[in-house]
Amino acid sequence: MISPVELSLLALAGYRGTQLVVHDSILDPARSRVDAWQQKRPASAFRKAVVTLISCVYCTGWWVAGALLATWLLVTGTWDEEPVLVHGFEWLAVAGAAVLLNRWDDSRKDDH
């Protein structure tokens, strides 16, 4: 099982990765292209799902947390040390901690 320090590190990375995908201006051109692609066929459920995925901190955060956790476990060679179910709980913990950081950050936007 990942340690509290690893959980914290992965949560911070998940928060940052989610901010990059959903909000950061460096990816504005990519998000604009995806939005324009969706507008060509607005009735497409698949296209709508893709736009939702890249614009929702909860949706994006879940997958970013999973990718980071899987990468961490594979790179550190700890994937096989625990059952897959334990890694599922770790995924929930990393995603939950990262989204708490996103919620905290979003709540501070009104302060500025």
Image (tube, rainbow, N blue to C red):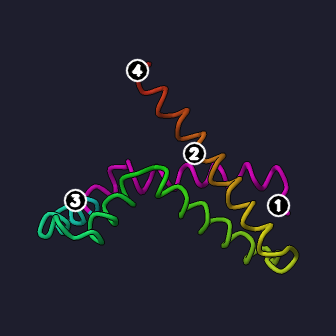
Label 3: how many Cα within 10 Å (few below 14, some 14–19, many 20+): few
Is residue 107 shown above or below 7? Answer: above
Q: Secondary structure at mark 1?
A: loop
Query: Are circles 1 and 4 on residues that touch, CB within 8 Å?
Result: no
Instruction: Please provide percent x and percent y for residue 58.
Output: 49, 51
Residue where numbered disc 3 is placed: 32
Query: Are circles 2 and 1 on residues that touch, CB within 8 Å?
Result: no
Cα distance between the residues tagged 1 and 3: 37 Å
Cα distance between the residues tagged 4 and 2: 21 Å
Q: Which residue type does callout 4 highlight?
A: His
Work out which residue is located at the far top of the displayed protein and give it.
Answer: 111
Give the numbered dot on residue 2: 1
Residue where numbered disc 4 is placed: 112
Cα distance between the residues tagged 3 and 4: 27 Å
Q: Which residue type does callout 3 highlight?
A: Ser
Which residue corresponds to the image point at 52% horizontal and 55% vertical from the top-left?
61
Cα distance between the residues tagged 2 and 3: 24 Å
Is residue 3 shown above or below 86? Answer: above
Query: Are circles 1 and 3 on residues that touch, CB within 8 Å?
Result: no
The quarter of the displayed image where residue 33 is located: bottom left
Give the foreground label among 4 and 2.
2
User: What residue span does the magenta drawing correspond to?
Assistant: 1-29
Q: Which residue type does callout 1 highlight?
A: Ile
Instruction: Please provide percent x and percent y for residue 24.
Output: 38, 49
Residue where numbered disc 2 is placed: 99
Instruction: Please provide percent x and percent y for residue 100.
Output: 60, 40
